[in-house]
Image (cartoon, rainbow, N blue to C red):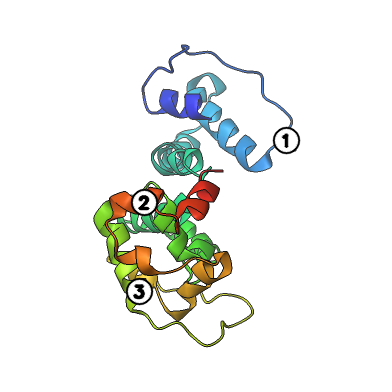
Amino acid sequence: MAELTLIVLGDTPPRGIHWSRPGAIHQARWMARNLYSMKMFMFAEQLEYDEETVVKLERLNLFLGLFYTPMWMSSTLAADAPANDLQFMKDMMKFKRTDPEIAQAVLQKLENHKWYLTQEVGPFALFGSRLSDKEKQDIAAKLHATEKPDSFRRGKPMFPQVTAKTTLADLVGPESHLLLDTLGIEYDWLLQPVATWPRSDDTARPWNMSAM
């Protein structure tokens, strides 16, 4: 999918342009439809699609190339998921200016998948690689200043409202203590410089876990 994305965007993959035989639609269904959409667009002239179909394929491939593929390629580390998901939502808010129909459809879908933006999971971003030191420090300071509840709520986490100005620090709340509490980690390191975190005894274990 990465190679097809480069071709769709007008570039050439490192190993050149070549075409693989399509696989069965039941294999990696979510990816297969993207692959077919890209190939349909690139071979639109040979397949003699009408203008309306070509325009729809162009719109879809613009979304796939600029947003979907990069997000998919960066989804391997759970610790980066909060930053990735928040940025994806903000990108779609901006994309409304270009293609409001696709952007709104994606945003509606993302409303059901904001697990990594909840109070409980959001602090996992502290151990990721996507945020600047300042962004991590803001999250740490907010968490350190937020009172830990006597007990954590049970059940489905509450999904937050996200705007174009929302930061991960804004999503920190009392339930954000659940992650560190579950891992048995003390809180003093939150006030230390970010550069010392990977070497801190209190952060070594979750940092190593986030790299798995």
Q: Residue furthest bottom?
A: 150
- Disc 2 secondary structure class: loop
Image coordinates for residue 89, horizontal then vertical, percent: 40, 58
Of helix, strand and loop, which one carries label 3?
Answer: helix
Q: Residues within 10 Å of mark 1 (few under 14, many from 20)?
A: few
Q: Which residue is the site of mark 2?
A: 99
Q: Residue at x 63, y 81 (%)?
A: 154
What separation in Å lies between label 2 and label 1 (alpha carbons)?
30 Å
**Residue 203 seen in this snapshot:** yes
* Farthest-out residue, left: 134
Marks 3 and 1 sit apart, C-alpha to C-alpha, by 46 Å
- Quadrant that contains the C terminus: top right
**Circles 3 and 1: CB distance less than 8 Å?**
no
Q: Position of residue 136 (x, y in %)?
A: 32, 58
Of pointers 3 and 1, the one earlier in the residue sequence? 1
Instruction: Pick whichever, 208 or 21, lies toward us.
Output: 208
Which callout, 2 or 1, points to the residue nearer the camera?
A: 1
What's the residue type where badge 1 is placed?
Answer: Gln
Nearer-N-terminus badge (2/1): 1
Viewer-nearest of labels 3 and 1? Answer: 3
Type of residue at label 3?
A: His
The residue under the point 37% across, 72% down is 143
Looking at the image, can residue 167 be seen?
Answer: no
The residue that label 1 is drawn on is 27
Amino acid residing under circle 2: Asp
Q: Residue at x 50, y 33 (%)?
A: 50
Q: Residues within 10 Å of mark 3 (few under 14, many from 20)?
A: some
Residue to which mark 3 is pinned: 144
Tell me the residue at 54%/62% (across/down): 113
